[in-house]
Image (spheres, grey):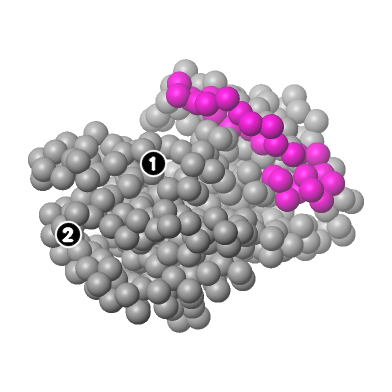
Amino acid sequence: MELEELAKRIVCTVSNDLSYDQRMIRMCTAMAEAGYDVLLAGRLLPDSIPLKDKAFQQKRLKCVFLKGPLFYLELNLRIFFMLMHSECDAIYSVDLDTVPGARLAQAFRRKRWIFDAHEFFTEVPEVVNRPLIKRIWKQVERMILNKADLVITVSDSIANVFKKSAKSHVVVIRNVPFLRSRSVKHMKKNLKKLIYQGALNEGRCVEAYIEALTELEDVELILAGEGDLSMALRALSQRLKVEDRVHFLGRLDPEQLWEHTCSAAIGLNVLEHKGQSYYYSLSNKCFDYMQAGIPQLCSDFPEYRVLNENWDCMVFAAPEAHDIAEKIKWLLHDREAYHKMAQNAELAANQLNWEIEKLKLQSVYESIG
């Protein structure tokens, strides 16, 4: 059964700010281009920027609480009441934190239910070492795998875990960017500039990147994102006397982020093994660095290992400052190796892009007809 037959109106729910959710912007745009009526609902935050017009509808939910148990309770109540009063044929829940409200509304309304796991939520560092919290979210995860009509996730490793207990179909839609023009990619690179895209959270090795600067002469670090460690990382850069070489840009819209990434020499994507979510990850930044035509430092984890065996555009580094510094020195000084990896990144980008990946999304609903 085609998606057109299955669901003409799809309501998607996320827990973050719509302006910066590149994956859902791509997903909803692809569904809208295929002729479906799509609404994406997310949060209104104190620093939210105005929404830009998209090919789909957008709605922001304003929560009184911004974090903690009361936030999750309030968010899911708002999602429940929104879905109960929204015209829809299918409900599309993104990550576990939007599931309780969506599932309750789905049970009342008997609509199709799709779940999209952008991460292995029960194995993220904030959850994995808190037994009670992990047990609660595990129950939510179990309910999804038993009840959802379709489960989507971002990597084969996570999909293989879900398939062991899922009664529904599990498919992989990788978090790849749009294909970009060569002229933009070939803008002049700053060969002393490193970039990290993403949340400034535990286990992302951002502390190690800052510490590595003490061993790297004249190298600058761009941090594009915010998170739980934002203030601590700023303090660390001052304590190590590298604050003039660490640039905290905060959250950037996709076009600003793209410009900064293209002008950098190396992308950073090293993780600590703090749970299976990181170990099985396949992040959007990995593909963004490829699209920009720059080599990247990565963790020697399963998904990145497979990619590098095929494309040879990564250098694996341990999650500690000295090894990160040594790998960066090698890349910046071995120009032949650097340019070969940059060329390979561009070749990978021609295959690993949204124009190709979205075709799977537009046909995947056939599996749940």
The C terminus lies in quadrant: bottom right
Q: Residues within 10 Å of mark 2 (few under 14, many from 20)?
A: some
Farthest residue toward the top? 64
363 and 54: which is toward the camera: 54
Image coordinates of residue 321 in percent, x first then y, are 18, 60
Q: Residue 357: within the magenta?
A: no
Q: What's the residue at 50%, 49% (across, down)?
A: 258
Q: What's the residue at 61%, 45% (across, down)?
A: 24
Residue 163 lies in quadrant: bottom right
Q: What's the residue at 15%, 45% (across, down)?
A: 242
Magenta region: 28-55
Answer left or right for 323 relative to 335.
Answer: left
Image coordinates of residue 195 in percent, x first then y, are 35, 53
The N terminus lies in quadrant: bottom right
Q: Is residue 303 visible?
A: yes
Please tell me whether residue 159 is drawn above or below residue 117 in the rendered image: below
Q: Amino acid at mark 1?
A: Gly
Q: Amino acid at mark 2?
A: Leu
Disc 1 to disc 2, how far (Cα)? 22 Å
Q: Nearer the viewer, mark 1 or mark 2?
A: 2
Q: Secondary structure at mark 2?
A: loop
Q: Residue 50: within the magenta?
A: yes
The count of marks equals 2
Answer left or right for 329 relative to 176.
Answer: left
349 and 13: which is toward the camera: 349
Q: Which residue is mark 1?
A: 225
Q: Which residue is mark 2?
A: 216
Image coordinates of residue 194 in percent, x first then y, are 32, 55
Indicate which disc, 1 or 2, sits on the residue closer to the N terminus. Answer: 2
Q: What's the residue at 58%, 62% (across, down)?
A: 182
